[in-house]
Image: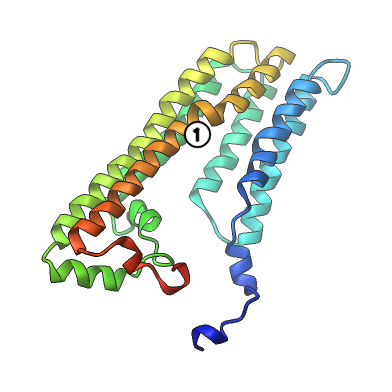
Amino acid sequence: MNQSQKPLTPSPAEQNDKEPSLMVNILFNILLPVIILMQLSSPERLGPATALVVALAFPLGFGTWELWQRRKINGFSILGLISVLLTGGIGLLELDPKYIAIKEAAVPGIIGLAVWFSRYTRFPIVEKMLLNPKMIDAAKLNAALQARNNVAAFRRVVNNAGNGVAGAFFLSAVLNFVLARKIVVSPAGSEAFNSEIAQMTALSFPVIVLPTMLVLFGAIFYLFARIGALTGDSVEAFLNDQNK
């Protein structure tokens, strides 16, 4: 089938692969939990324990629905679901609030370690993320690198980009830990604890996500810039046809 004959309506598989929008993610993972924890945790309303369960049901339910819809086991999504369950467990079991900080740091820390060590396996995460075959024509890129005898140099570039990606997750771990320790100080299971969890969740985007994304984008920009330098062509030359 040529380009003009491609169907305009995406197939069911393509629809399942489509990720929810940023606004939908923010709504279910940040806004709704924050509103519930801050507005419904008082004893006159839902109470701390019930409000915590209801608030965490939104990201947990959304994450489960997303996994079911896409029919794919995604390590990042699984860690996210585990993180939500741990937050609920710490609150309902009324554990020391320091465990929230440990949990908040552990999730991105584990991802960072996975990114780091995967470079020494047959399934490097960075290459899957930054050189996704759905986006980059790997055969064409390799041919251009071989033509200039720059294959080994490109491997070093990919390693450096991998360091940047892993560093972004390690930065997230540190920022998560500091933010949680500064904010979540009240006994778990209390109304104040729920309010602090809500405050931490609300601040996570400007304090943690934005700096982490800047580091990630820096790694991506570096990789794409070096592709141009090592091949003599811009990265657009190696995009698959559907991405042009």
Q: Is residue 134 visible?
A: yes
The relative height of residue 196 versus residue 82 in the rendered view (above or below) is above
Outermost residue toward the right in this view: 44
Q: Could you say where residue 204 lies in the image, as x and y percent from the top left? A: 55, 28
Q: Quadrant of residue 46?
A: top right
Residue depicted at 55% across the width and 31% down the height: 205
Most foreground residue, 189 or 178: 178
x and y percent of residue 154 in the render?
A: 20, 57
Task: Quickly name the residue at label 1.
Answer: 209
Residue at the farthest left position: 149
Look at 70% across and 28% down and name the residue there. 34
Task: For residue 96, say whether it is visible.
Answer: no
- Tell me the quarter of the image containing the C terminus: bottom left
Three-letter code for the amino acid on which mark 1 is drawn: Val
- Secondary element under disc 1, as helix, strand or loop, is helix
Residue drawn where x is 71% and y is 32% of the image: 33
